[in-house]
Amino acid sequence: MVFLRSCPVFLCLLMAISATCQQHLPTEMFDSIYQNAFRAVGSDNTSAMKGLQLLLPDSMDHSPAQTARIKYLRYSISHAYEQGLSAVEERKFPAHGFHEYIDSLIFLSRQYLDRSMPDKAIPLLLEAISSLSSKSEKSGLHTILLSEAYRQKQEYTKGIALLNGLFTGNEPLPDEERAYAYNRMAALYNEWGQPPGSSRDSVFHYSEMCLALSERIGSIPNMAASQNELSFLFIRKKEYDKALKLSLESILNFEAAGMPFHAMNAMINLSQIYRAEKKFALALKTVDRAIGMSEIKQNPNLYLRLYCEMAEIYKSLGDMKEAYEMLRISYRLQGGFFRDRIDMQINEQSAKYDLLVKEQKIKEEKQINAFQHKQLILLIILLFSFFLAFVAALLYFRLRKRGSIRQKLMEAVVETETRERKRIARDLHDGLGPELSAINHYFQAFLDARPEDKEPIRDRLQQVISGSIEEVSRISHNISPHVLEKHGLEMAVSNYFSSFSGNSGIQINFRADLPERFDLTKELTLYRCITELFHNTLKHAGATHVLLKIWAGRNMIRMFYSDNGKGFLTGINPVTGMGLHNIRHRIESFGGKFDLESAPGKGIKATIELPI
């Protein structure tokens, strides 16, 4: 597609600009040129370049937003032309000797860290550290750089541990590196915010030590970095006067040290101070200056933050259109960084921009036709009335359904309690009753026996008493599994199955992945469901293999149970139906889900999902 053919308006536009190059380009015309040029990027780069040239004359009086958009358009066109970027990015400097190779690793890792690419820096630093001895003069710098990489990955405890080990070690640390380490420790505490109440003291402490040491040795980069950290600390404390002074000093020092990326980062803090003080013009001027200090391709992640900051400024100014455009550019730049956060901001600005357009249309329609406006209000009232009626009906039927579920749950609870009472009575009658009768029999025999016959009777009596104790323990465990209360669901189920291993003729395969405990009531509910399913397998299925898996994820605990028994037609079997009915109502009472699959000769497969 040829750009000038697809957009004939560009011919007239080019003539108008050539005739009056000193005039300000109208916003609508700028937007049209920019959008058409941007659409051509990648498919027709020649046309995109022509569009960019229409926007580039120095005589054009561009706004900061227009300047930022032109810069991004130029970056997009340049990026589309370039080939083999990944090969260049992965290039390593030739290492003719061991120390030259280590130096190249330091240089590359610093380049990546300056561009907020810690995942690429960490392997290089680990390789360098493994190649150096702990007593090498360069090992300290590698450790500091590695802590900085962990800070950028938000793994603050790892970075703090590395620097603490450096401070408490026996090896001397050069003053320049010690100042740098103090500053990075302050940065870690500044972003981490832990431990609560003392992190700010740590930031101030390490920043002050860095400042004092930097002033003594004349280290401008470390002095600027500490001023920037303190500025950020005072911004969080809303002490903007102190933050402003430190921020301006850090920018000047960064520029004097030839560190443009750090200066641009400090300008973001300065813009935030101006925004907090509602000095939006100064904030916009600061970000505009920062955007012009480098090229986007040198540090896309930093420019992502700059465009986000400019969007916040325009949002504060009420210019939702430009705020939306800046966030669109940020979205394109992010390349996997902070995608969720940017998506949220873009949606918010897009919604506000759409709302603004709709309000303007409503206002115009009101001025043109008052009658249509009244009809619209009437329609809204009717729709709102229907909506209220629909919500009321929905609530009514939901309450009725909830009442029905509650009733079924009560029935299930009563049924369960009745079954439990019968089971306990059966256990006492069939299990403990004979044991107690045997104890009475052997005790009477012991009393009546001759002295030489009492020894074997006493041994047998002790065995019967021990069996009775075990039977009482088993019955108590079935009534209230104390293992569940003390150790959780996984241990309780394992303990339950252990009593059947070896004597039930069933191979039990139990696996659980539960990182932490959850509500005891829900643990007990799930435990009862598992024992009910296994009881049905023992009693009715004739199975030889049982599989049980329990795992947690995404605020939900899930369970899968299966056996290779004879199965049944679901919903018809009168023997197991009531137990499964109780399981379903137990799970649904907590907002969970119970699914069962079975067929004659196919065993059963049961799935439970329970909100944590």
Image (cartoon, rainbow, N blue to C red):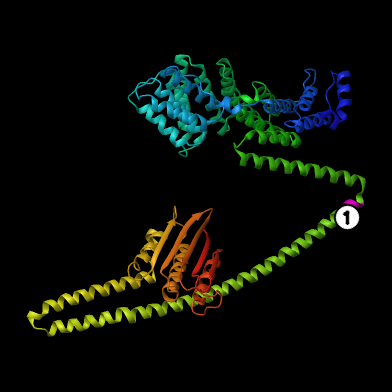
Instruction: Pick whichever, 297 or 527, lies toward us.
Output: 297
Image position of 4 (left or right of 102): right
The x, y position of residue 480, in whole percent, is 39, 69
The x, y position of residue 168, in whole percent, is 35, 28
The verdict on residue 275 being magenta is: no
Residue at the front extreme, as displayed: 601
Up-down relation of residue 482 to residue 5 (above or below) = below
The x, y position of residue 167, in whole percent, is 38, 27
The verdict on residue 373 being magenta is: yes
The x, y position of residue 430, in whole percent, is 33, 81
Q: Quadrant of residue 60?
A: top right
Looking at the rendered image, the quarter that the N terminus falls into is top right
Instruction: Pick whichever, 159 or 539, lies toward us.
Output: 539
Up-down relation of residue 319 to residue 288 (above or below) = below
Report helix, strand or loop for mark 1.
helix
Where is mark 1, residue-wise? 375
For the magenta stretch, what is the residue range? 371-375
Task: Give the residue drawn at x 47%, y 25%.
Answer: 183
Task: Give the residue drawn at x 52%, y 63%.
Answer: 608
Q: Is residue 242 visible?
A: no
Instruction: Pick whichever, 305 or 395, lies toward us.
Output: 305
Instruction: Pick whichever, 18 or 82, lies toward us.
Output: 82
Mark 1 Cα shell of 10 Å, populated few (<14), some (14-19), many (≥20): few
Residue at the left extreme, as displayed: 452
Q: Is residue 551 visible?
A: yes
Q: Quadrant of residue 385?
A: bottom right
Q: Quadrant of residue 420?
A: bottom left
Up-down relation of residue 482 to residue 88 (above or below) = below
Does the magenta stretch mainly form a helix, a strand or a loop? helix
Image position of 268 (left or right of 131): right
Q: Amino acid at mark 1?
A: Gln
